[in-house]
Image (spheres, rainbow, N blue to C red):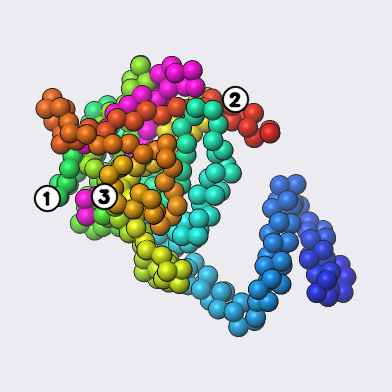
Amino acid sequence: MGIVNQDNITDVVIDSLGKSGPITERQREIMTGVIKHMHAFIKDVKLQHSEFLEACAYLERAGKLCNDNRQEFILLADIIGVEVLVDMMTNPVSGNASESTVLGPFYRENPPVLPKGASTIQKHFDNEETAWFEGYIRDENGNGIAGVTLDVWEDAPNGIYENLDPDQPEYNLRGRFETDETGHYAFVAVRPVPYPIPEDETAGELLQFMGHHPNRPGHMHFIISKDGYRPLISQIYDADSAWLDNDSVFAVKESLIGTFKPAAPELGTDLHFEFDFILQTAAAEKAIAAE
Ligand code: BEZ
Ligand code: FE
């Protein structure tokens, strides 16, 4: 420890890390970065005490909003592009593997387990367009992978996720599917519509402050997993959706855009959306982590 001044404060705080308690090397690396960058930022903008107190009060309000249905800190991170950047650091683009993108705050554990080809629709809306979603989950050599689990979720045609809408049944438009022996998956759902992320409270204040809109283009969320493969958290986007090139959370990737086509009569839906995913093996994941 030492007597601090403006020049040595950063080193003094970094030196104190782990002095009276356990700290892992990774925790030390992260905390050193946080302290260094935070101090540099404060010096850079000459942060004033009243502004510091304002930030603390804002974060306190954000924390109080968090509950099982609202994770305000993920939302705030999304609005300033932090979750998508963390995802890019966690899952760098590699070979021909499918790209990941943000999880977002609306995933629910343990969705209904449904057979291949079943529908996730539990409530109908006048403006809905039903769609047959299908494709193959393959490895990097092009072989279909059997027994892959796909969790899927999306907003309803009113633009609201079921857990935020008291008028929708529990787990509406959510499901867990499995690929067949050829690696093929299929399910019925609705064409996802663009929707605004929650724009009230602290998330709304941040959006307004930045002069941004809250809208996301229509997308279907996926978590695709199987032992021995790297889990893939991703979304597929409707090529004809509004906001595709101006997503409020910066999560659209070119490779994740697909097209809804009119469905053949035997599918029994309005539309047809085909999309294949390529998973990396867990061994490939270890190799990337070691780089
Ligand atoms: C979503 O896609 O569900 C989402 C992602 C980031 C922020 C809000 C919602
Ligand atoms: Fe979403």
CA neighbours of label 3 inside 10 A, class few (<14), some (14 to 19), many (20+): many
Q: What is the magenta range?
A: 131-158
| Residue 105 seen in this snapshot | no
Mark 2 or mark 1: whose residue is earlier in sequence:
1
Callout 1 secondary element: loop
Q: Residue at x 15, y 27 (%)?
A: 264
Q: Which residue is at a point 26% across and 49% down the rendered structure image? A: 193
Q: Which residue is mark 1?
A: 126
In the depicted structure, whether residue 134 falls above or below residue 217: above
The amino acid marked with disc number 1 is Asp
* Label 2 SS: helix
Residue 104 percent coordinates (x, y): 42, 50
Q: Which residue is mark 3?
A: 193
Residue 1 relative to residue 89: left or right:
right
Tell which of 129 and 168 is nearer to you: 129
Residue beneath disc 2: 283
Say which residue appears at 31% left-offset and 42% top-offset: 239
Residue 8 visible = yes
Question: Which image quadrant: the C terminus?
Answer: top right
Q: Is tag 1's residue or tag 3's residue first in the polypeptide sequence?
A: 1
Q: In the image, is the residue at mark 1 within 8 Å of ligand 2 by its beta carbon?
A: no
Crowd band around label 2 with a 10 angstrom C-alpha radius: few (<14), some (14–19), many (20+): few
